[in-house]
Amino acid sequence: MDSSPTSDTPSRPPAPITGPFVGAIDEGTTSARFIIFRAGTDDIVCYHQIEVASIFAKEGWCEQDPLAIANTVNECIAGACQKLVAAGGKVEDIVTIGITNQRESTVVWNRNTGQPLANAIIWLDNRTTSTVEELLETIPNNARNINYLRPLCGLPLSPYFSGVKLRWLRDNVPVVSQAMEKGTAMFGTIDTWLMYCLTGGKDGGIHKTDVTNASRTMLMNIETLQWDTNLLKFFGLPKTILPEICSSAEFYGNIANGVLKGVSITADLGDQQAALVGQQCLSKGQAKATYGTGCFLLYNTGPSIVHSQHGLLTTVGYQLGRKSAPYYALEGSVSIAGAAFNWLRDNMGIIQNSGQIESMANTVDNSLDVYFVPAFNGLYAPYWNQDARGVICGLSEETTSEHIVRATLEAVCFQVRDILDSMHKDCKIPLAKLMVDGGMTVNNLFLQLQSDLVGIQVLRAKIAETTALGAAMAAYKAVESRYSMEAPLSKSGPREPIKPSINATERNLRYQKWKMAIERSLNWETSTLPQGEREAFDGA
């Protein structure tokens, strides 16, 4: 007798979704999300995501409205909790939340009113190039050495970091400089601003950050993990504006209003450090790469500080508890990764959408010796050359759009090799495998090219949301001491490695040509013809 359900058989209600749950605020450059995980796992129960608008007031500027960011995050929390209830879960089962955020982006607000004094200057904003030039002039003996502060903070002097953005605000926005003088200004990166707003704002909101975000300001001593008097003096900034520095996993405060009123905030990590944790790169010698608009590689150096001699940044990887030892990392940043394909689409019309990239690149066996250096606004690690500009080398009559698309994929891979080679030189430990995540990792050909061109195994993350996962893991660790962050997160088994399919000879030959293309891109913005050549050109 057939016992299968019929139209007359009453359907069973879906099984209730049971906790405990952990929430993660993931506030990125283009969107904000609130993701609810089953505690201690990578199982996403539900999430809500909303885009965040950027303001481009002038060429090279990128701002966002701090109030809009805070409101968007609150909407994401409300939306995700609504979905949780609709799925049969209970908001009361969210035991804690963590925060992860776009790093370096800078907010200044009034201590008395809680209102921003200016729009947030976003990390990729380059208005502060002139500020860097002015600061270089203050270095003793006319050295103009961008690494002058590296022994203290681990970072080169660059428009990228919060301290430089703060100095620009002090010099160019009168209301900010006046508030600094009066002692009414408060500074924070996006994590600090969100925690301040979530915990009450002007009515008792906390003013805190964690060691990972503080390590990207150029104001924290990389050894003491405290604000450094000499660094503050160099930038001409008062200590009164700065938040308290905490570990990445501890009690910060309780949410003051809304659907999560009373829920604790127990983790805070910058987005790339959160991805390091989410990928479980928790031992010395492990590394991860996150591919998005740009690409960020972090290499766990353990409790030891490694000052790079090859163009990398020294940063805090995480500190999982106030009494725990900090773990450090070397970081290399690629400014243009996925953004190169936006250029192919929007400026060149070579592709119509990102879904075409893999299929187009797969129609050709190789790039036909075409090399593309997408240095639209200079090169980051390990070159740190702001005057580099993009070049495409090796074009011939046989070059097609498909070859250029494939060369663009390879360009990201070669830039990652640049950074991994520098990490190897600094740490003397060969990397056996690279954990990868981010939007570009859905492309199987890209991951095979990455493995081929660096010569190591590549392992793709089981879920795309490793950044939010890292914040959730750290938050749960702060409230559940028995939780092991090294334990398997997923029941779906280990990741399948992608292995190199070319030999070392071919790999190194192609890398040599990449380096030739790099040479042609360097110092383009400041390059001029020698006097004799210029006269010959003018007379032609």
Image (cartoon, grey):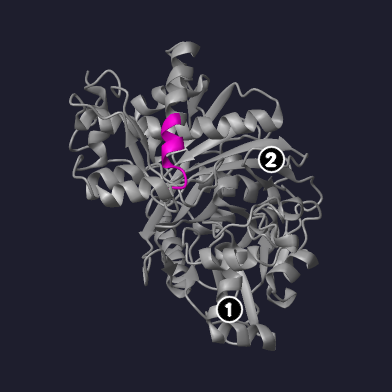
The local secondary structure at tag 1 comes to helix
**What residue is at 60 percent from the left and 42 percent from the top?**
331
How crowded pointer 1 is (Cα within 10 Å; few <14, some 14-19, many 20+) is rated as few
User: Is there CB contact under 8 Å for labels 1 and 2?
Assistant: no
Q: Is residue 201 visible?
A: no
The x, y position of residue 413, in whole percent, is 44, 31
Could you tell me which quadrant the N terminus lies in? top left
Q: Amino acid at mark 1?
A: Asp
Where is 324 relative to 139, above or below?
Answer: above
Q: Nearer the viewer, residue 155 or 68?
A: 155
The residue that mark 1 highlights is 171
Q: Nearer the viewer, residue 466 or 507?
A: 507
**Magenta region, mostly helix, strand or loop?**
helix
Q: Going from the N terminus, do you reach mark 1 or mark 2 first?
A: 1
The x, y position of residue 396, in whole percent, is 22, 27
The local secondary structure at tag 2 comes to loop
Query: Left or right: where does residue 45 sit relative to residue 469?
Result: left
Q: Quadrant of residue 233?
A: bottom right
As measured in the structure, the alpha-carbon distance from the residue carrying label 1 to the one carrying label 2 is: 31 Å
Q: Amino acid at mark 2?
A: Ser
Where is 56 relative to 355, above or below?
Answer: below
Q: Is residue 522 magenta?
A: yes
The x, y position of residue 4, in whole percent, is 24, 26
How crowded pointer 2 is (Cα within 10 Å; few <14, some 14-19, many 20+) is rated as many
Q: Nearer the viewer, residue 488 or 500?
A: 500
Q: Is residue 298 visible?
A: yes
Q: Quadrant of residue 329?
A: top right
Q: Which residues are magenta?
A: 516-524
The residue that mark 2 highlights is 308
